[in-house]
Amino acid sequence: MKFQILDVKREGGSSCYLVKATLQEYLAALPSNYSSYGVQRSIVSNIYLDRMINTVLDKAHIPSITLVSTAGGLAGGAFLDSDFKILDGLQRTHRLKVISDTKDLFLKRVMNDGELGDFQIRRKYREELVAIGSSGNILLAIKNFCEEKGEVELERCFSDASQWFEIWVGLTPSEEIKKMLLLNAGHKPVSIKHQLELLFLNILPMMSEIKVGQIKILRDKDVSATSFSKIRKLGEYQFSQLISALVSFVEKKPIATNAEFVESVQNDEGRLEEYIEKFSFEFLQSFVRSVFAIDAACFENFGDLGNKWVAREVSLVAVFAAIGECCVNAQDIDVVVSGLTRNFSKCKLDAYEDARNSLDLAKVNIGRVNKVAIFSGFKYFIKSEFASEIDWSNAFMDVA
């Protein structure tokens, strides 16, 4: 992407360049996997962004887009390789790409397709529009503009329209995440689950390499917690759910992974590094193997009820907090979980559901109560060496 440097600021070992380029240059240089950058959220619905077609055709101002150069710098001082990532502006970029693709579809196909009316155009090209993420409204806006001002003027909406970019060079992965969270602070809030995933993102590749059963780890942007609890299958877990269970194991108590927790990890110097140091590949293997073993035992003994129980974050968080409390060191996890799964029928998840559903929701914080009751029930079950069934009535009575 060719550009003109307008200003530059230095920040520690990194530099931020304010540059100007045309929309045509930017879209031509856009990597094919531009939307797959790990720290970014998924493409979201937004009626205002969907109206960007009018902004493009009017050559009006589009807020600056922030990029990260991953190729070691800005080649020649005025050229950016296609090996870059979008730190802020993914939603705008996606709409610009859709509009450009729709413009190409119009010029190649629709413009020479006789005297079709608007309805016939929408219907004939519906599948092609869906394939590029576009709509009939965008296509007709381009058609009307071209009929009024001509093909050359339509192309100039991209070739002559300038766009401002901030291009960061030299950011570390943790600095990229901090910049991304700062840039999104005034936008639609970044979910706590997504923020949690970003903080621990470097352990995801290690987890993904572990071959235990049919393991599938899903990101928050892949599926919401509500949808996940309804559709999950054996071996499927949300990444944020696994992180919460991991941290609870280390802390030996159920952790509430809320905004306060995320903020404390970000602001407490060295805390995140302490967690990461404990998550060696060997330990993560044992942990993932243990999660799957408990998941399988839940399903084997309690069927769909067990499947839904595992899908709730409070369940794994509390169980692994209890396991952590009962382990002298991290290496004990395999032994403890082996004994637990052999005796899982004594966990009586059906009785747990009955006790849980008997609570007066107006008088208790159901999330906290569930978490503490599960932690208490499993802790004493493990420490008793699985001598008797978990008494869920007593577990909930102690908490409430």
Image: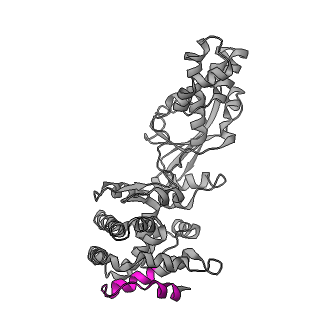
**Colour setup of the view:** one colour
Q: Report the residue at 50% width, 62% height from top.
A: 196
| Res 292 visible | yes
Query: Residue 384 in the image: x percent, y percent?
Result: 33, 88
Q: Is residue 41 magenta?
A: no
Query: Residue 254 in the image: x percent, y percent?
Result: 47, 76
Q: Report the residue at 47% width, 45% height from top.
A: 37
Q: What's the magenta region? A: 374-398
Query: Residue 374 in the image: x percent, y percent?
Result: 45, 79
Query: Residue 32 in the image: x percent, y percent?
Result: 45, 34
Q: Report the residue at 56% width, 42% height from top.
A: 90
2 vs 146: above or below: below
Name the foreground residue: 1 vs 34. Answer: 34
Q: Is residue 310 left or right of residue 101?
A: left
Which image quadrant for residue 211?
bottom left
Q: Is residue 382 magenta?
A: yes
